[in-house]
Image (tube, helix red, strand yellow):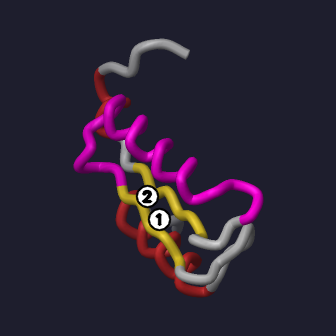
Amino acid sequence: QGPISGVNKEIAVLQCHGDCDPLVPLMFGSLTVEKLKSMINPANVTFRTYSGMMHSSCLEEMMDVKQFIDKHLPPVD
């Protein structure tokens, strides 16, 4: 733990959460994303929720993750 400074304040974050997660309630995801936005550039924080998704993943989420990776990481040769 410690202050976030410099280039780290500009890191891109994708946080995904199912709205039916019985292990980690959506409220905790919402609180986490608000904390992240207070620590780094809030414009770089994306929070996605998925209807009906429990503590798992879904195709829509995986497509969002792929899009995020394609946008923010350099291609691998």
Amino acid bearing label 2: Leu
The residue labelled by disc 2 is 73
Q: Secondary structure at mark 1?
A: helix
Contact? badges 1 and 2 (CB < 8 Å): yes
- Whether residue 57 sits left or right of residue 36 in the image: it is right
The residue labelled by disc 1 is 69
Q: Residue at x 61, y 83 (%)?
A: 52
Q: Secondary structure at mark 2?
A: loop
Asked if 44 appears above or below 9 in the picture, the reply is: below
Amino acid bearing label 1: Ile
Q: Residue at x 48, y 13 (%)?
A: 2
Q: Residue at x 33, y 19 (%)?
A: 5
- Whether residue 13 sits left or right of residue 23 in the image: it is left
Asked if 36 appears above or below 67 in the picture, the reply is: above
Over which residues does the magenta segment extend?
Answer: 22-45
Label 1, residues with CA under 10 Å away: few <14, some 14-19, many ≥20: few
Q: Quadrant of residue 20?
A: bottom right
Please provide percent x and percent y for residue 15: 49, 57
Name the image quarter holding the N terminus: top right
